[in-house]
Amino acid sequence: MNITIFGSGYVGLVTAVCFADVGNDVLCVDVDAAKVAKLQRGESPIYEPGLTELLQSNVNEGRLRFTTSAEEGARHSLYQFIAVGTPPAEDGSADMQYVLAVAKSIGQYMDGYRVIVSKSTVPVGTADRVAEAIAAELATRGATHEFDVVSNPEFLKEGAAIADFTKPDRIIVGSSSERATNHMQQLYVPFNRNHDRVVVMDVRSSEMTKYAANAMLATKISFMNEMANLAEKLGADIERVRVGIGSDPRIGYQFIYPGCGYGGSCFPKDVKALIRMADEVGFKAKVLQGVEDVNDRQKTVLFDKIKAHFGNVSGMTFALWGLAFKPRTDDMREAPSRVLMEALWAAGAKVRAYDPVAMHETAKIYGARDDLYLAKSPEDAAQGADAMVLVTEWRVFQSPNFATLAKLLNKPVIFDGRNQYDPQHAKRAGFSYYSVGRASV
Ligand SMILES: NC(=O)c1ccc[n+]([C@@H]2O[C@H](COP(=O)([O-])OP(=O)(O)OC[C@H]3O[C@@H](n4cnc5c(N)ncnc54)[C@H](O)[C@@H]3O)[C@@H](O)[C@H]2O)c1
């Protein structure tokens, strides 16, 4: 099948390589000419495990192409995927300008029936706006081509995106047209062999499903962070509490890890956008507001602990281990590391930072500055620093040599934002050790 995908970011590119890899002819359209040139050479602009291999093999075998031409994209195929960004606007609502720009281009150039598939996370009711934008363009040029707009939200996790796409828990199809639903079912057959994962529903429920899923996951995290902060005050150990509650199958062990706040391109913006959607219909989303407030506060927890330990940090240096918002990605959007670094800089401290893959992104965001040293290894970051702060739980940080670390640091102090270490082990190695929701040692 021929497929067009607008937007070659985390979602668009993964969707493209996975569809191409099962034999489809995929054309990706992106407005970023530099990104398109890179992709044409088989180079991935993002870090995602397994992505580069699939990109190169499918480009080499001619099933995957990249262009900046929306016209070529709109003419290429029946399926027109929209996978462009929906970042937060000033008021927290999702900024729809990129989605609507794509809709406009499709309306301008389509030359037959089209199924327009929204993979971007879009506010409830967006499919109607996309349909209006396309209809307006068709009317302007006096064309009468038929089309259907379908919602097909994406649930991939960065860091495990290829596996999530090829072995999905569910494939949500929001559609009011039988014709479009049949086309969608056909398209997903290769990812649906084991059992039928396609869940068909109305468009608005599908659009809302994506927000509700992310809001639920963000709620689990903020809930655990609230419990962790409380555990510290009450003299309990949140890691014991976590195991204690996770054993209840109604709660489960997944996604109940306390830490220094959630980040990334999805949870923060989707929770905000859902709060705005509620506002617009005169409904106060109290749980969601709480989830967001707790997360904002949690992102300052590490800095607060650093200040409580050292007092004035002006002139001090901190080693940061982990910069990406989570392991196995280079995505720095809304990363807790950014809140921490910016607080340290504002207080006159310096940062020596290391991340296995997000160094390039960090350099892009902050440029060259005297108070940021981009280290070559975890050890290089620790060299001469006054404390080590673990921000992202990459595997490579999980079992450090504490004796070596103690020698590298000026002062043997660890602030562990992800509860990666055993407090007693850290203590025996001579460290002052702070974590989240457990007594400091
Ligand atoms: N990143 C994730 O883990 C994830 C997961 C599920 C859903 N989503 C949702 O998917 C959508 C895309 O997210 P992302 O992280 O891939 O975004 P991204 O910022 O990585 O990529 C968006 C791409 O769209 C391109 N673009 C912008 N306007 C365009 C246009 N008019 N025509 C063609 N291309 C255009 C940009 O140049 C960019 O390459 C968002 O709505 C997001 O909420 C993201």
Image (cartoon, rainbow, N blue to C red):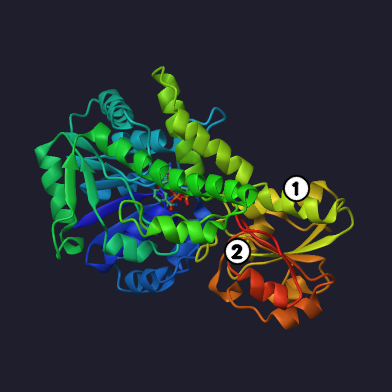
435 left or right, relative to 49: right
The amino acid on which the numbered mark 2 sits, given as a three-letter code, is: Ala
Label 2: how many Cα within 10 Å (few below 14, some 14–19, many 20+): many
Q: Which mark is residue 358?
A: 2
Residue nearest the observer in this picture, 215 or 332:
215
Q: Quadrant of the C terminus?
A: bottom right
Question: Extreme front residue here?
Answer: 235
Q: Which mark is residue 343?
A: 1
- Residue at 18%, 33% (x, y): give it: 145
13 up-or-down from 424: above or below: above
Q: In the image, residue 289 lies at what x, y percent?
A: 50, 32
Residue nearest the observer in this picture, 196 or 10:
196
Please tell me in which quadrant of the rendered image residue 189 appears. Answer: bottom left
Total marks shown come to 2
337 up-or-down from 441: above or below: above
User: Distance between the Cα atoms at labels 1 and 2?
Assistant: 20 Å
> Would you say residue 92 is visible in this rendering?
yes
Q: Secondary structure at mark 1?
A: helix
The amino acid on which the numbered mark 1 sits, given as a three-letter code, is: Ala
Please tell me in which quadrant of the rendered image residue 118 appears. Answer: top left
Q: In the image, residue 237 lies at what x, y percent?
A: 57, 58
Q: Secondary structure at mark 2?
A: loop
